[in-house]
Image (cartoon, rainbow, N blue to C red):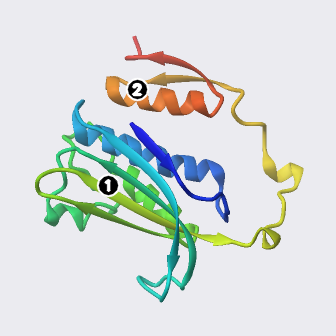
Amino acid sequence: MKARLEAKGDTVLADSSQLEQVLMNLIVNATDAMDGQGSIEVVTSDYVLEREAEGMAPGRYLKLVVSDTGCGVPPHLLKRIFEPYFTTKNRGEGTGLGLSTVYAIVQGCGGHIEAHSWPEGGTEFVVLLPYVERESVAPARESESGPRRGAERILLVEDEESVRKVVSKMLRSAGYEVMVAQDAE
């Protein structure tokens, strides 16, 4: 997995745990599509939308792109990819809620998401989240901020080795202590 974090660090109005879920779901989806081979790239950058498009106002946005070199998604399935319970996985291997959850979170933040896929393989998800002025964002009160995050211990149970590695690495980089298991046995 490669990451290029080129955004300048302006503020988006979003819950950090929801943004983590967006990133996690997109990376897990990419990992599943590659079947143990290939690469994933995560890129952030600043983006300026010059005129209204897809219902989004002109302005400055954080652009997040998660791309993979996996098997790709056929066009007739790509248009359904954000539907709840839609999955290309075999029965019992996925709920079909990962990408619909990503879609709902991005929309809830006033953003936009789209997916592109190519017949020769590879898929890319592009997320745009509007930047806000720091002065317009009120700091969270202590009671709203919840418990300190990142110091907890997490048990990660995942049978797919590539998913297990990616998720474990992400959790550790967020400061969590991670115990990893291949199955519940």
Picture quadrant where residue 83 is located: bottom left
**Residue found at the very far top of the displayed protein:** 185
Q: On screen, 92 above or below 105?
A: above
For the N terminus, the quadrant is top left
Return the x and y of residue 107 as percentages of the image width and height.
50, 69
Residue 150 in the figure: left or right of residue 179? right
Q: Secondary structure at mark 1?
A: loop
| Lower sequence index among marks 1 and 2 | 1
Q: Nearer the viewer, residue 179 or 71?
A: 71
Q: Which mark is residue 85?
A: 1
Picture quadrant where residue 40 is located: top left
Residue positioned 58% across, 27% down in the render: 172
Q: On screen, 167 above or below 33?
A: above
Residue linked to disc 2: 164
Comparing labels 1 and 2, the label whose residue is closer to the camera: 2
Q: On screen, 19 above or below 166?
A: below
Contact, CB < 8 Å: mark 1 with mark 2? no
